[in-house]
Amino acid sequence: MVKKVLGDRRAIATLLLPAMAIYVLAKLVPIAWSFGLSLFSGNPLRGFKFVGVQNFVKFASDPAALKATQVTLTYAFVVTIGQVVLGYLLALLYLFVLKNASSTIRAIVFFPTVLPTVSVALLFRGFFAIGDNQGPANSLLNAMGQPSLEFLGSGMGTFFVAVMMELWRSMGFYAILLYAGLVDISNETLESARMDGASGFRLVRHIVVPLSLPILLSSVIFSLNATLKVFDGLLALNNGGPGTETTPLTLFMYLTSFQYAEYGYGSTIAIALTLLCLVFTLVIFRSSRRDITQN
Amino acid sequence: MRSSLRIRNQIGRIFSVAGIVLLLIVVVYPQFWMIAGAFKTQAEFFNNPSWALPESLNLDNFVLAFKQANLGQMYLNSALVTFPSLFFILSLGVAAGYVLEVMVFRGRNTLLLMFLAGIMVPGQMILVPLFMFYFRVGLTNSLWPMIITYTAMGLPLTVFLMATYFRALPREIFEAATMDGASMIRSFFSIGLPLMRNAIVTVAMVEFFSIWNDLLIALTFTTKSSLATIQVGLLAFSDEFGSIQYGPLFAAISMNILVVLVFYIFLNRQIMAGLASGSLKG
C-alpha cells in the first residue's frame, strides 16, 4: 500500500509536469533547434537556406572564429590556474594562519563574488583608465617611477586587466570552496604528521595537498566551465576590443546572431562552445579518475 | 636557541599581518575608490589625482544618475524579472526534486540525469531559437521572455540540488506519513517543504545572484530601453555618458554595489554556503 502511494501517478504528474514542461520547451527543444539551425544560413527575415555542414567548414577556416576560440581558451586556462592557485593559498591562510579568527576576513574577501560583473568591469575600467585622469593603477605606476600605461588600448593590456578583474572577483569564492575541503582533513591526520616532524611547508606539500586533490580537481572543472563561458566581463570591460582582440566565443556568437543576424552560423558557434565545455570536463574527469584508481 | 625561535616566530607574525593587510587593501580599496568617486564633481575628476578623496559629500551625482539613467525604472525591471523567476524556479524545482527523489516510479533516474545534463550547456545554445519563438508568439516587448528563460536555465541546478537534499532525509518519514493516510501531495506540503526550508534558502541565494547579475539573457531580450534591467541599463549608460560625466556613472555603479552589499551584510553566511554548494553551476 505504501508502494502504491509512493508511486501515485497523479501526484507525480502534478508535482513534476510543470517543471518538465518548462525545461523541455525552453531548454531541450531550443538545444535541438540550435543543432537544426546550424545546418542553415540566413534569418527569419531573409529566409533560411539549407547549407549542410558548410557553417562548420566556415567555422574551421574563419579567422574571427579561430581568434575567438583562442581568446576563450587562453582566458579559461590563465584564469582557472590563477583562481585555483590563489584560492588555495587563501584557504591555507584561513586554515593555518588566521584559524578561528578568519570568518570576517573570509566574508570580506568573498564579497566581490556576488557583485554584478558589469559593475566590477566598469569599476576596473575606471581603475585602470578614466579619460585624461588615468586612474589609481597608473598613479601607482607613476609613484614607482614608471610611465603610465594605456592598459585598455591594447589587446594584451585589456586581457591583463580582465584576468586581474576576474581573479579579484572570484578568489574569495574559490577560497571558500577549497577551505571547505581543507577543513575536512581530520585534525588527527594533521596531528600525527606533526608528531612525525612535518611542519610548515613540508606539512602542506606532503600531507595537505595530496589530501585535497579531489576538491582541487573539482574546482578546476568548475572554474573551466565558468571561464569558458566568459561573457559579461569582457563585454563590459572593453567591448571585446580593441577591435576583436578580446572577443571570446560567447560574444562572437552573440554578435553573429543578433548584430549580423546570422542565426545559422551563430548556432554553429554555440555548438562549438558547448563541445569545448563538454570535452574539457570529460578529459579532466577521466584523468582524475585514472589517478584515483592508480593510487 | 630559544630566543632565536621566538624572533623567527615574531618575524613570521609580522609577515602574515602584512600579508593580510595587503589582501584587505586589494579587496576593499577598489570598491571604496568607486564609492568615493560617486561624490566627486567633474572638476575634481579632471584636476585632482585619481586617488584623492572627494572634497564634499553631496548627493548630486546620485540624483543625476537616477534622472538621466532612469535608475529607478531599471531597478524595478530587475526586481520584476528576478522575483517571479525565483518564485517559478523554486516552486517548480523543489516539487520536481521531491518527486524524483522521494517517489518511486520507473524512469526517475533517467529524468534526473536529463535535468543534470542541462547544467553545463551554455546559454548561447538556446538564445536564438528562444528569440525566434518569443517573437513568433508575440511575447517580445515584455519581461516574460526573461522570466521564462531564467526559469528554464535555473531549473536543472535547483532540481539537482533539491534531489540531493531530499536524499539526505530518512525515507521512513514519508513512508510513515503514507501509512497515516497522507497523500504524496499532502506530505510534500506538510512535511517536505517545512523540512527543506534551509535548503530552499540556500538554492534561492544561488539563483538570486545568477539572475540579478546576469547580462547575457537580459541583453538578448531587452528589445526596448524601458525593459532594461539594471545590468543592461548600466552598460548602456556607461556607453552613452561614461566618457563625459564620470560622477553620475560612478554613482550608478556604486548604487549597484551598495544594493548587493546591504543584502550581503545580513545574509553573508547563507550566501557563502549557498554559492559554495551551488558550485556545480557553470
Image: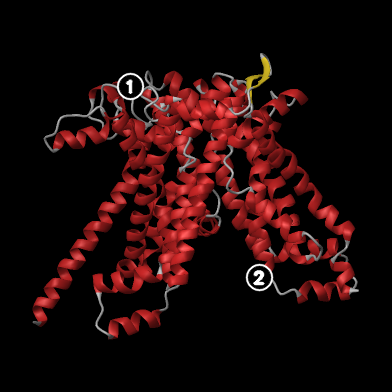
Which mark, by number, is residue A65?
none
Q: Residue at x 42, y 61 (%)?
A: A216
Among the 4 quarters of the image, the one containing residue B189: bottom right
Identify which residue, B25 or B121, lies in the foreground.
Answer: B121
Q: Disc 1 sits on a residue from what chain? A: B
For marks 1 and 2 on the same chain, the one whose residue lies earlier in the sequence: 1
Q: Quadrant of the N terminus of chain A?
A: bottom right
| Mark 2 Cα shell of 10 Å, populated few (<14), some (14-19), many (≥20) | few
Q: Residue at x 22, y 32 (%)?
A: A138
Residue A58 percent coordinates (x, y): 51, 25
Q: Amino acid at mark 1?
A: Gln
Above or below A46: residue B73: below
Res B36 seen here: no
Residue A143 percent coordinates (x, y): 14, 36
How far, Cα to Cα, is label 1 from label 2?
A: 58 Å
| Mark 1 Cα shell of 10 Å, populated few (<14), some (14-19), many (≥20) | some
Among the 4 quarters of the image, the one containing residue A12: bottom right
Res B156 seen here: yes
Identify which residue, A240 or B233, lies in the foreground.
Answer: A240
Q: Amino acid at mark 2?
A: Ala
Residue A283 percent coordinates (x, y): 48, 54
Q: Residue at x 34, y 31 (%)?
A: A126
Q: Which residue is mark 2?
A: B168
Residue A162 percent coordinates (x, y): 36, 37
Identify which residue, A140 or A268, lies in the foreground.
Answer: A268
Q: Which element type, helix, strand or loop, lies under badge 2?
A: helix
Q: Which residue is mark 1?
A: B42
Q: Residue at x 53, y 34 (%)?
A: B215
